Image (cartoon, rainbow, N blue to C red):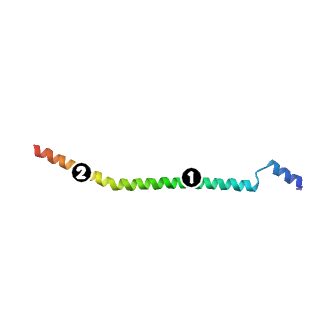
């Protein structure tokens, strides 16, 4: 059946032991964690940008409306 030589030969033919497989799996999980953290940081940066735009958009729109009104009034007064 399974003699020690057979077991030893399998170990030589397949050098990846259980520890090696576990180590590779751990590295894979760590890399996945790094990718997820980087993606989360990108989402945080995008949310910060959107909050900032949401703050400044009404101010810019209001300024444009006021400028338009002032321009129309100035044009109307010259006529």
Label 2 crowd bin: few (<14), some (14–19), many (20+), radius 10 Å: few
Residue mark closest to the camera, 2 vs 1? 1
Splitting the image into 4 quarters, where does residue 22 fall?
A: bottom right
Label 1 crowd bin: few (<14), some (14–19), many (20+), radius 10 Å: few
Number of on-image labels: 2
User: Residue 41: x percent and y percent?
Assistant: 50, 54
Secondary structure type for disc 1: helix
Identify the mark at residue 65; answer none if there is no mark. Answer: 2
Q: Residue at image x 78%, y 50%?
A: 15
User: Residue 35: x percent and y percent?
Assistant: 56, 52
User: Residue 71: x percent and y percent?
Assistant: 18, 46
Identify the mark at residue 35; answer none if there is no mark. Answer: 1
In the visual, does 4 lie left or right of 29? right
User: Residue 30: x percent and y percent?
Assistant: 62, 55
Identify the mark at residue 45; answer none if there is no mark. Answer: none
Q: Quadrant of the C terminus?
A: top left
Q: Residue at image x 21%, y 48%?
A: 68
Splitting the image into 4 quarters, where does residue 2 fall?
A: bottom right
Residue positioned most to the top: 79
Residue positioned most to the left: 79
Q: Residue at image x 89%, y 52%?
A: 5
């Amino acid at each position: 059946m399974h003699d020690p030589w057979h077991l030893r030969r399998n170990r030589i033919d397949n050098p990846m032991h259980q520890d090696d497989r576990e180590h590779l799996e751990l590295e894979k999980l760590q890399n996945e964690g790094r990718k997820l953290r980087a993606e989360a940081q990108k989402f945080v940066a995008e949310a910060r940008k959107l909050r900032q735009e949401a703050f400044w958009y009404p101010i810019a729109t209001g300024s444009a409306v006021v400028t338009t009104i002032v321009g129309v009034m100035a044009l109307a007064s010259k006529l």
